[in-house]
Image (cartoon, grey):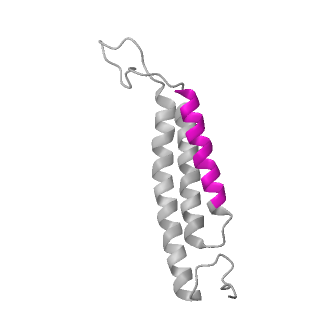
């Protein structure tokens, strides 16, 4: 299970970095989103991956999951949604003002 999570984190980070290096603003926004998903998975897996462990205290539970990574990931998800919404609005505004979606504001010459 750890190998699968590691591969998923690496794939998401690689795709995110690849998209962030492109010259289009929406590619950069999607790349940042994928990179934030990779970081969220990393944070979540840092609390050890256990199956059939209770997240809340109950008398029937014999094992518990670590609640700190879960709380960190939930906070990071909320912050990530806010950041993504801000970047999408900023990209739309830049497209409206500049007439293209290049990160440097200049359209490519074809």
Find residue 18 and report its horizontal and vertical position in percent. 65, 58
* Residue in the picture at 42% in, 22% down: 51
Q: Pick the quarter of the image with the C terminus.
A: bottom right
Q: Nearer the viewer, residue 56 or 108?
A: 108
Find residue 23 and report its horizontal and vertical position in percent. 66, 72
Find residue 52 and report its horizontal and vertical position in percent. 38, 20
Q: Is residue 37 above or below residue 30?
A: above
Residue 32 lies left or right of residue 50; in this view the side is: right
**Image mark count:** 0
**Which residue of the protein is positioned furthest toward the front in this rendering?**
110
Q: Quadrant of residue 22?
A: bottom right
Q: Quadrant of residue 53?
A: top left
* Residue in the picture at 59% in, 38% down: 7
Based on the picture, tell me whether residue 14 belongs to the magenta stretch.
yes
Based on the picture, tell me whether residue 34 belongs to the magenta stretch.
no
Q: Nearer the viewer, residue 15 or 80?
A: 15
Q: What secondary structure prevails in the magenta region?
A: helix
Residue 75 lies left or right of residue 109; in this view the side is: left
Q: Which residues are magenta?
A: 1-18
Q: Is residue 25 above or below residue 68?
A: below
* Residue in the picture at 61% in, 73% down: 24
* Residue in the picture at 62% in, 48% down: 13
Find residue 34 and report its horizontal and vertical position in percent. 55, 53
Q: Is residue 46 above or below residue 97?
A: above
């Amino acid at each position: 299970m750890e190998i699968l999570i590691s591969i998923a984190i690496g794939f998401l980070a690689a795709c995110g970095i690849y998209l962030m290096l492109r010259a289009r603003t929406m590619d950069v926004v999607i790349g940042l989103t994928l990179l934030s998903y990779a970081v969220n998975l990393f944070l979540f897996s840092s609390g050890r991956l256990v199956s059939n462990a209770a997240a809340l205290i109950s008398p029937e539970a014999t094992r518990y999951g670590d609640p700190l990574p879960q709380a960190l990931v939930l906070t990071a998800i909320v912050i990530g949604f806010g950041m993504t919404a801000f970047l999408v609005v900023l990209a739309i505004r830049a497209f409206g003002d500049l007439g293209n979606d290049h990160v440097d504001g200049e359209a490519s010459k074809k």
